[in-house]
Image (cartoon, helix red, strand yellow):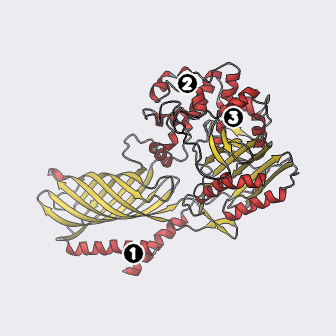
Amino acid sequence: MKKTILLIQVLFITANILAQNSPANNPRFSVTTFSEQLGFINLKNENPIHLGGTIAIGFAKKQTGIYQSFHNIEIGYFSHETLFQAITLAWKPTYEWQFKKGLHIHGTAGVGYLHALPKQQTYTQDNGTYKASNNFGKPSATASIGMGIGYRITPQNNIPITIFTRYELTAIAPFNIYKDIPAIANTTLSLGVFVSPFN
Amino acid sequence: MKSYNIFLLLGITLSLIACIKEPTVVTSSKYDCTSDIVNTHPNSAVFDAFLEDKIKQGIPGMTMIVESPAGIWTGAAGLADIPNNIPMKACNKMRIGSTTKTFTATIILQLAEQGILNLSDSISQYLAPEMVKKIANAELATIEQLLNHTSGIEDYTGLINYSIKLLNDLNHPWTPEEELAFIYEEPAAFAPGTQRKYSNSNYLLLGLIAERVTGKSGTTLFQEQIFTPLNLANTSFNQVHSTPEDLVRGYSDEEENFVLVDRTDFTFAHSSMDGGAISTVADLRTYVQAAMTPGRLFSAEMIERMKTVIPPSGEDQTISTKDTPLTFNGIGLGWFNMKTPYGTGYGHGGALRGYKANMIYFPDSKTSVCYLMNGNNGKVSELEKTIRSEEIVSLLFE
């Protein structure tokens, strides 16, 4: 547990440092909702939809012409239909190419932390017999890459609001919920919105 | 800021723990059953103590039966349902996993004795041509090679795509065709007859062959050919996925530290002829004795053939190299051959998430032992491995 708290502290501190060092120190917020599935890219998805969502804060790092990069700190939650639910925290540098008429494409690569909790009651031995017990979950590390496309829906003079969709591949290790598989890939298809309220 | 972050994390974690699905409240009548076996074995107290010891070590619940010329004993220990604190009974039903394969082998061997098929026939004669084309070795492998796991046909349960599909949809009711689709276009493990490697796909294919040549479902075949003739009233196989009401809960040690979760409703192999049956220790003991007794299910010649291990030309991956009292010595026609200092044992085990089964008959000493556990994986599985390979021999014979 101490390690978990320490890791989260490190991510928050990193976010603060990034914010302070940002040349354009006006944060951009994003909210997404996504469907997630375990496994590599599978466009013909016949699996149940495992839903989740994220909230992120991004700090502009560099802007050159149509190119802009951000540091994003993202907190998320997703829920596997039967097996587990998880909270995630990740640092995701994002690279964005903005085109005419508000269109952009972006790519992300990130690392983070995932805390998975079983969705079912767990039992441990107590005085020779099994009884219900609390389970505070297990930690995993994550690494992700993703590609997305977005469109600014507000005019140039207003607060920038951009809707976007992103396809992302995340590796989770160790995968503590189902021990047959030590590490697992996880794909998400997200729909979200970027808002820069202080622009 | 620091304490705020910690409280935020704790708040989120506790909220998620609060979202855990609560187990259903039931009474002990849900698992009611009666046994007509009277314990006469002189070692009954030793067997009872053995079960109690295993429960203390971490097995959630266990049933067992031992029969030898000295007498019979059956017993149970632990819990059938942990959250409702319902004790296990010797007559309780559990999933038996791959022990089901011996039922499938029985159907095939009976069909061979009836002259409906030949064990040396290529399986391609009995399967749909489009399926044969997609499965490596299906054109060459024989029925006998499926039975003794020398076909080289890849095991669908060992493929990452299967594991991922299973993980994504743990309540999916599988059909054999869906399971076999995972090995379509997969290369064979080896040329037929050259090695031995346990493969669940072999028994899915045998099930399909039995169904095609008889025009009957696996459920009907098991019932008509095995369960009804042997009066196995507490044994069932349901290809339409469902969980019987009186099935005891199955628990899995996913974290490998004796932290159990209920896996009763996860559907891996629940409706296929490689692992879908449900039974009791008493029924398994009746079955294993009948299978080894000439004239009950097969002729004496077929029993000998069934028990005989024909070594493949190359490596046999089922042979145990460990120096334990019980070592695996290969697979006959559906039956494992196990060497012990007290004679050869014949039987089969089974494992599903949450359940473990084993059934062995020692013809030399006319001793049979069957046990079922409602726990599996992780440390629980390690305990069972020790029972099977080390402790069962001394318990029975020393």
Q: Is residue B231 left or right of residue B377?
A: right
Q: Is residue B249 visible?
A: no
Label 2's element?
A: helix
Nearest to the observer: residue B365 or residue B280: B365
Q: Nearer the viewer, mark 2 or mark 1?
A: 2
| Subunit of label 2 | B
Q: Chain of mark 3?
A: B
User: How packed is label 2: few (under 14 Cα within 10 Å), some, or many (20 or more)?
Assistant: many
Indicate the quadrant containing the C terminus of chain A: top left, top right, bottom left or bottom right: bottom left
Residue A141 left/right relative to B137: left
Placement of A48 over or under B109, stated as above or below: below
**For mark 3, does the 10 Å Cα neighbourhood hold few (<14), some (14 to 19), or many (20 or more) residues?**
many
Give the amino acid type for the residue marked by disc 3 in the picture: Lys
Q: Chain of mark 1?
A: A
Looking at the image, which is closer to me, B165 or B326? B326
Q: Residue B196 in the image: x percent, y percent?
A: 55, 37
Quadrant of residue A43 within the rendered picture: top left
Side of B171 where B338 appears, left or right: right
Q: Residue at x 17, y 60 (%)?
A: A68
Place of residue B259 in the rendered image (x, y in percent of width and height, measured from the top left): 59, 63
According to the picture, the residue beneath numbered tag 2 turns out to be B123
Q: Amino acid at mark 2?
A: Ile
- Determine whether the residue tagged by mark 1 lies in a helix, strand or loop: helix
Q: CA distance from mark 2 to mark 1?
A: 60 Å
Same subunit: marks 2 and 1: no
Q: Are marks 2 and 1 in contact (CB under 8 Å)?
A: no
Residue at the spot of label 3: B307
Q: Judge from the rendering whether residue B138 lies leftward or rightward of residue B203; answer left or right.
A: left
- Outermost residue to the left: A65
